Amino acid sequence: MKLHDAMVHLRQQLSDQVNTFVVQARAVDAMDRELLDARDRALRLHHTTKKLKDGAEKLSSELELILHHQDAMHEALSALERQVEEDGGAFPDHPSERLQAYALFEQLDRELNDTRRLLDDTIERVNSRANRAPHPGRGAPTPSLNQVNILDMVNILDVHLSAFQYLEQNGKKVEDALQEADHLLGQPRAP
């Protein structure tokens, strides 16, 4: 029996070692999977880092190009400003036709507004006088000399109002034409 017991004992030890080996193999397999996952994450991180670095380099080169263009534009604008100052200094008594047109338009606009205010005041006074004038009794009123003068004045003011409206409409057309010309020339409109 000793042989049989020894065999059983060896089988039991072998079975325990196999079980220990299986547990260790599973642990090694789990660690291997963790290592593979860590490797994959590291590779993805490396790839992402490389893409970010390439993107940053590309942005940096584009920013450098933009700064270069900005410097070139600044130099060109400075040269243009100097040229305009020099050209403007050569003709101090002769403003450009565009500036003359703007000044004329502004003056006409001021005069039109002043005349409109004066016209509004006059119409208001005429209306207040007409409301205060005594109305004759029944029947058709006969206009007095004062009322005839007021009617003539209203007609004259009406003609003036029509003329001012015409001037205002044409002034708007001139303004639109000047803005379109400025737009086509690529120059900002002077206020």
Image: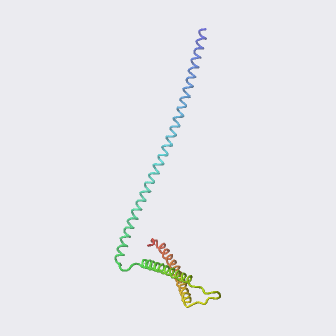
Q: Position of residue 33 (x, y in %)?
A: 54, 34
- Is 74 on the left or on the right of 173, as rendered? left
Q: Position of residue 125 (x, y in %)?
A: 52, 82
Q: Give the percent coordinates (x, y) of residue 8.
A: 60, 14
Q: In front: 121, or 183?
A: 121
What residue is drawn where x is 49% and y is 43%?
45
Tell me which colouring the rendered structure shows.
rainbow
Question: Total of numbered circles in the picture?
Answer: 0
Q: In x, y percent, where is residue 30?
A: 55, 31
Q: Quadrant of residue 93?
A: bottom left
State the residue in front, 3 or 25: 25
Residue 85 lies in what quarter of the image?
Answer: bottom left
Which image quadrant: the N terminus? top right
Instruction: Determine whether 58 is above or below 39 in the image.
Output: below
**In the image as oriented, which residue stretches furthest toward the front?**
137
Please, which residue is most extreme toward the top here? Answer: 1
Above or below 137: residue 8 = above
Where 44 falls versus 5 (above or below)?
below
**Quadrant in the picture for the C terminus:** bottom left
Q: Nearer the viewer, residue 29 or 10?
A: 29
In this rendering, is residue 3 above or below 138?
Answer: above
| Nearest to the observer: residue 10 or residue 112 | 112
